[in-house]
Image: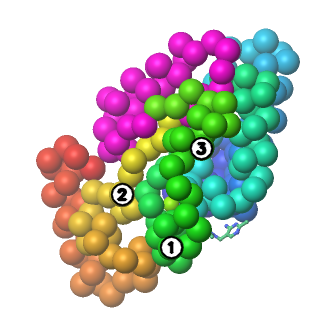
Amino acid sequence: MPSHPDRIKTPGVDATTGSLGQGTSLAAGIATGLNMQGSENYVYLIVGDGELNEGQCWEAFQYLAHFKLNRCIVIIDENKKQLDGTTQDILNPFDIEEKMRAFGFVTHKVKGDDLIAIDQAIEDCKKIEDQAVCIVLDTIKGQGVKFFEEMDANHSVKFASEAVQIATNQALEELRKGRA
Ligand SMILES: Cc1ncc(C[n+]2csc(CCOP(=O)(O)OP(=O)(O)O)c2C)c(N)n1
Ligand SMILES: [Mg+2]
């Protein structure tokens, strides 16, 4: 995966994004088109918690909620960090789940490394018929590799080869345990 989602490079990614916030409007547009066509397809919109700094996100959310576009499943990656620090220090998002509820969404909050819980939350979202839906993932930035998890500034990192070896070994260890 490149650092920004790229529909040419990553199978399963349908929209190339990178300018924060724009993916929310794009997903709302795709969801509107599908709805007009009577399609039963789903749109999965993944948004960062720092990305929520962008006012554009809230405009798109309000739109999704107003038009009850419940086939757009909004997934917020609440890893508590953004590019240059913690979300709390840079621009406090307060309670994201509560905010999404206030915007008219049905919400679920699950641990970001619990695949079964995420799958269940998606299935629960699909049962909602007349309201927009959102899953807030409680995540850890760099999860699965202690070396990254414990690093303060872990948005984009340059490594000495020794650090690469430590991180790789930790990742392999996690994979062996079936947790990464
Ligand atoms: C409009 C816009 N402003 C700034 C940036 C630079 N930028 C890239 S990632 C990022 C932080 C995003 O934080 P978050 O959404 O929490 O993602 P995470 O780093 O946790 O994956 C910023 C400010 C950008 N890509 N687009
Ligand atoms: Mg983040």
Residue 89: where, in percent of width, then height?
50, 73
Of the residues under marks 1 and 2, which one precedes in the sequence? 1
Residue range of the region highlighted in magenta in the rendering = 109-134
Residue at the image point whose x is 19% and y is 67% from the top = 169
Is label 3 in a helix, a strand or a loop? helix
22 or 5, which lies in front? 22
Image quadrant where residue 37 sits: top right
Residue 16: where, in percent of width, then height?
70, 51
Residue at the image point whose x is 20% and y is 64% from the top = 170
Q: Which mark is residue 99?
A: 3
Q: Amino acid at mark 3?
A: Lys
Q: Is residue 35 left or right of residue 137?
A: right
Q: Which residue is mark 2?
A: 140
Mark nearest the camera among 2 and 3 is 3
Cα distance, mark 2 to mark 3? 21 Å
Local packing at callout 1 (Cα closer than 10 Å; few below 14, some 14-19, many 20+) is few
Cα distance, mark 3 to mark 1? 19 Å
